[in-house]
Structure formats: C-alpha cells, structure tokens
C-alpha cells in the first residue's frame, strides 16, 4: 500500500514555522490540542523537525526560568528537541512506515526535495487496518 493513501496533506496539518517563538508554539498547541507539531521552513516548506510540549517544558525550565516574556524572544529552533520525528519519503514502503508509527504519534512525509507534504497519523493506519478486518472504527 502507498504512503499517500494514509496522508493528511500539509494544508490540513497544524504546523510550526522555524522562526516562531516558544510562546507562539505553546499557543498553537493549546489551540489545536496537539502535543507535537511538525516544524517547517516558510521559504521552501522543508521539514525541520518536530516540537513537543515536553521540549517546551524543558526549555522553559532550563532557559527561561518560566518567564513568558523570555519565551517570546526564544525561537523554537534554539531549544533542544528530545526526539525528532524522522520523516519518510513518499516512496517509503509500509514496513518502514509502520516501524516509525510504532514510536511516533505521526510520521512526517517529505518529497524528493525534503519539502513537507503532510503527515501519516498512527490513527489513520490503525483505522485502515480495522476496516480491512471488517470492523467499524
């Protein structure tokens, strides 16, 4: 099966841009309800990593002393990411996609130029599996 079958396109994803501040990222996470968001570069759409709420928590503790004014000045790319969600290409086979989905809530998908084109969620993979065995989700 093709990765694109499971893809949530970029236009439907909540993303962060690499020049955003921690405060901005926190607001986007709160508004969306997501605890991890892909980071992309505005200019060319390249995937730059994933930011989690845990990354923000540790950055605030280490670098901002919980001062939200400082959080406005600190870029999300300046903080350490505990674990980046590694992307897959559109040509990735299902075995590799499933391996990544076991350890990540979503798998970023990039094209041949490393431009972010969307995500595959663990939920979409499981829903397809359940449907294939004749159960309703």
Image (spheres, grey):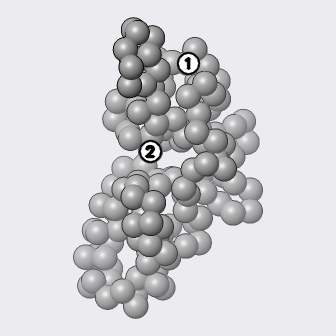
Tag 1 and tag 2, C-beta contact below 8 Å: no
Q: 83 or 21, which is in the foreground?
A: 21
Q: Quadrant of the N terminus?
A: top right
Going by the image, does 97 lie left or right of 12? left
Residue lying furthest bottom: 69
Q: Secondary structure at mark 1?
A: loop
Q: Earlier in the sequence, mark 1 or mark 2?
A: 2
**Viewer-proximal residue among 43 and 14:** 14
Q: Is residue 60 visible?
A: yes
The residue positioned 47% from the left and 30% from the top of the image is 124
Residue 112 screen position, x and y as percent = 72, 36
Q: Residue at x 60, y 24 (%)?
A: 5
Q: What mark, if any, has residue 93 been given in the picture?
A: 1
Q: How many marks?
A: 2
Q: Answer above or below: position of 30 versus 48.
A: below
Dot 2 falls on a residue whose secondary structure is loop
Q: Residues within 10 Å of mark 2 (few under 14, many from 20)?
A: many
- Dividing the picture into quadrants, the one containing residue 129 is top left
Relative to 55, 25 lies left or right: right
Q: Position of residue 6 (x, y in %)?
A: 56, 28
Is residue 87 visible to us here?
A: no
Q: Looking at the rendering, which quadrant does residue 66 occupy?
A: bottom left
Cα separation, mark 1 vs mark 2, equals 17 Å
The local crowd at label 1, few if under 14, some if 14 to 19, many if 20 or more residues have their Cα within 10 Å, is few
* Residue at image mark 2: 85
Residue 88 coordinates in the image, percent (x, y):
56, 33
Q: In this view, which residue lies farthest toward the front?
A: 136
Residue 100 coordinates in the image, percent (x, y): 42, 31
Q: Which mark is residue 109?
A: none
**Quadrant of the frame with the C terminus:** top left
- Between 63 and 22, the one nearer to me in the picture: 22
Image height of 55 relative to 99, above or below: below
């Amino acid at each position: 099966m093709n990765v694109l079958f499971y893809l949530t396109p970029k236009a439907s994803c909540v993303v962060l841009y690499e020049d955003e501040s921690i405060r901005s990222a926190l607001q986007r996470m709160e508004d969306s309800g997501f605890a991890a968001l892909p980071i992309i570069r505005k200019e060319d759409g390249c995937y730059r990593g994933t930011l989690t709420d845990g990354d923000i928590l540790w950055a605030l503790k280490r670098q901002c002393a919980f001062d939200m004014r400082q959080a406005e000045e600190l870029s999300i790319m300046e903080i350490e990411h505990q674990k980046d969600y590694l992307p897959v290409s559109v040509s990735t086979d299902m075995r590799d996609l499933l391996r990544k989905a076991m350890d990540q809530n979503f798998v970023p998908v990039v094209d041949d130029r490393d431009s972010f084109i969307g995500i595959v969620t663990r939920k979409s993979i499981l829903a397809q599996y359940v449907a294939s065995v004749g159960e309703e989700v």
